[in-house]
């Protein structure tokens, strides 16, 4: 028989529309709230029944993988592409800021690649294992060029991103770009030499904004 199996049979038009709605809803929720949202949350946000979610995805981990696979690979690709830059410091800085921007915009992505321990699927695990050696190579090149502190290790990178993530969590609704100010301060502290301090990428919070961000 030439009938396609249920696994390979193309989705009906309405089923495919529902799948796209689920992916879009999950992408928004994962970015805003992280990957701990429930399948009920995703179904509600997509405007479909929760049974529709389970017909398309066996569990939350499978949905996380389907939604965030491209975002994880984008971060890995940023690190690998940065290695093509001739200047080691510019390469390190380029990736540092690009990754920080990705993590600020997508809480779920930061949880997977920086915080870890969220039980994501095999595909995301494999992509994540590509990131550490690329980051280590960026760090080593900048250190060998005398541009980056020699006591920095590749494991410092996620810790620094966690620090920036804390800024993002407190200021997301008030000053979403505030992390750029502290990223600049961190980069100036990591660099071994500079002609002058780098202009900060965002204004400091006012007293009122600070109070609101910590309330």
Image (cartoon, grey):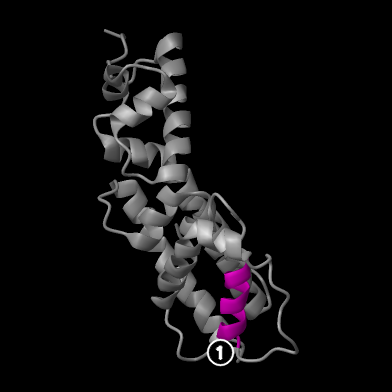
Q: Up-down: is 109 above or below 151?
A: above
Q: Residues within 10 Å of mark 1 (few under 14, many from 20)?
A: few
Q: Up-down: is 112 above or below 11?
A: below
Question: Which residue bears the numbered disc 1?
Answer: 144
Q: Position of residue 55 (x, y in %)?
A: 28, 20
Q: Residue at x 57, y 57 (%)?
A: 101
Q: Residue at x 54, y 49 (%)?
A: 173
Q: Position of residue 10 (x, y in %)?
A: 39, 15
Residue 90 lies in magenta, yes or no? Answer: no
Mark 1: which secondary structure? helix
Q: Which residues are magenta?
A: 181-191
Q: Main secondary structure of the magenta part?
A: helix
Q: Position of residue 183 (x, y in %)?
A: 58, 71
Q: Quadrant of residue 18?
A: top left
Q: Residue at x 50, y 83 (%)?
A: 140
Residue 184 lies in magenta, yes or no? Answer: yes
Q: Up-down: is 86 above or below 196?
A: above
């Amino acid at each position: 028989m030439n009938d396609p199996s249920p696994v390979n049979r193309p989705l009906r038009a309405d089923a495919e529309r529902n799948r796209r709605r689920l992916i879009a809803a999950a992408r928004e929720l994962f970015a805003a709230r992280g990957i701990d949202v429930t399948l009920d949350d995703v179904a509600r946000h997509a405007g479909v029944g929760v049974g529709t979610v389970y017909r398309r995805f066996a569990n939350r981990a499978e949905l996380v993988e389907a939604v965030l696979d491209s975002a994880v690979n984008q971060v890995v690709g940023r690190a690998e592409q940065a290695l093509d830059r001739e200047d080691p410091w510019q390469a390190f800085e380029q990736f540092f800021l690009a990754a920080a921007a990705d993590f600020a915009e997508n809480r779920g992505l930061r949880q997977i690649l920086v915080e870890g321990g969220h039980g994501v699927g095999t595909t995301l695990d494999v992509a994540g294992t590509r990131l550490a050696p690329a980051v280590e190579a960026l760090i080593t090149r900048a250190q060998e060029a005398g541009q980056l502190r020699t006591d920095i290790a590749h494991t410092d990178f996620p810790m620094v991103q966690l620090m920036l993530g804390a800024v993002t969590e407190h200021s997301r609704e008030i000053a979403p770009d505030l992390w750029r100010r502290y990223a600049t301060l961190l980069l100036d502290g990591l660099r071994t030499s500079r002609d002058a301090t780098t202009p900060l990428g965002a204004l400091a919070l006012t007293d009122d904004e600070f109070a609101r961000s910590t309330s």
